[in-house]
Image (cartoon, rainbow, N blue to C red):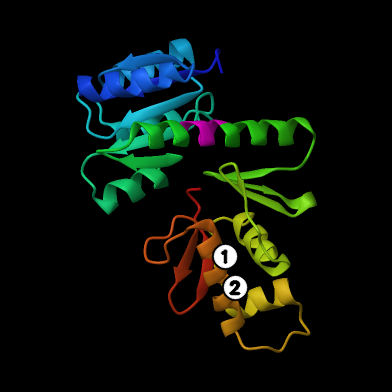
């Protein structure tokens, strides 16, 4: 933790100093920026371990900063926690769609923010350890799938999936953007001999979404293609 650098980007001095104080109290090294362009320069110069990024920024807003960093292979693995004062669902969903790893609304509890930071860094550590051990790993935003061990993590939390839920998630996620009908999902996950009702797929998808904390009305991971079937979002 003493070598863990966190970049805070916010044009409100009070917020910036509040977050900085609470993170430094936990032993983190803190870098600060008041606008988007400065933030990108600091990322290039200091390569922080995590970024706390406000949406409403001068010069370049937080969404554009996030989009720029996540589209750059050198920096795309750096976790980004978005801050938003608007409380508009559109902003939060858009932030996640362009690659943000988490978000928190203003006003927030400093204790909650510190907990989110620690959780995100632990998740990153889990991923690094899994990759170092030679396990085949797939990463989609904050979802980590380890096929050989039938393990799925959301952040640092290991999800308790049934075998069919895991097979559904693996099939959809490893074919991002491809639409699968319910009948095809029945064939591939349950087997050709399965003669059950296609509602079985819907039930399993619903349970899977609940475990992924994926809102069916504004899905981040599993999208419904009305009248056809399902697909895994190709922006994950």
Q: Secondary structure at mark 1?
A: helix
Q: Residue 164's quadrant in the figure?
A: bottom right
Specify whether 201 is left or right of 70.
right
Q: Residue at left 66%, top 51%?
A: 152
**Principal SS element in the magenta part?**
helix
Q: If the image is split into quadrants, where does the N terminus sit?
A: top right
* Picture coordinates of residue 186, whole percent (x, y): 67, 78
Q: Which residue occupies the foreground of this view, 22 or 43?
A: 22
Q: Is residue 168 above or below residue 81?
A: below
Q: Is residue 95 above or below residue 21?
A: below
Q: Residue at left 32%, top 47%?
A: 92
* Picture coordinates of residue 173, whole percent (x, y): 60, 56
Q: Is residue 61 above or below residue 226?
A: above
Span highlighted in magenta in the image: 117-121
State the mark number for residue 204: 2
Q: Residue at left 30%, top 17%?
A: 33
Magenta segment: does it hold 43? no
Q: Marks 2 and 1: CB-CB under 8 Å? A: yes
Q: Which residue occupies the foreground of this view, 188 or 101?
A: 101
* Picture coordinates of residue 226, whole percent (x, y): 43, 75
Q: Secondary structure at mark 2?
A: helix
Q: Which residue occupies the foreground of this view, 177 or 139?
A: 139
Question: Which residue in the structure is indicated by mark 1?
Answer: 208
Count the marks: 2
Specify whether 151 is left or right of 112.
right
Q: Is residue 73 visible?
A: yes
Report how far apart the C-alphas of labels 2 and 1 lie in the structure. 6 Å
Q: Residue at left 73%, top 66%?
A: 163
């Amino acid at each position: 933790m003493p070598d863990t650098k966190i970049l805070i980007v916010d044009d409100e001095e009070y917020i910036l100093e509040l977050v900085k104080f609470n993170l430094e109290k936990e032993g983190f090294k803190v870098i600060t920026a008041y606008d988007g362009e400065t933030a990108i320069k600091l990322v290039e110069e200091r390569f922080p371990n995590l970024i706390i990024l406000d949406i409403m920024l001068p010069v370049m807003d937080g969404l554009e900063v996030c989009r720029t960093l996540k589209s750059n292979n050198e920096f795309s693995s750096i976790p980004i926690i978005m801050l938003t004062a608007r409380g508009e669902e559109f902003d939060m969903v858009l932030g996640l769609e362009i690659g943000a790893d988490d978000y928190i609304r203003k006003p927030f509890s400093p204790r909650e923010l510190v907990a989110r930071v620690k959780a995100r860094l632990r998740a990153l550590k889990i991923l690094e350890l899994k990759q170092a051990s030679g396990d085949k790993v797939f990463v989609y935003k904050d979802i980590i799938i380890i096929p050989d061990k039938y393990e799925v993590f959301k952040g640092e939390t290991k999800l308790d999936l049934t075998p069919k839920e895991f097979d559904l998630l693996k099939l959809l996620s490893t074919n991002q953007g491809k639409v699968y009908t319910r009948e095809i999902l029945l064939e591939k996950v349950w087997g050709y001999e399965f003669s059950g009702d296609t509602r079985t797929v819907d039930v399993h998808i619903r349970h899977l979404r609940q475990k992924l904390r994926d809102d069916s009305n504004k899905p981040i991971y599993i999208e419904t293609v009305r009248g056809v079937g399902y697909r895994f979002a190709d922006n994950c």
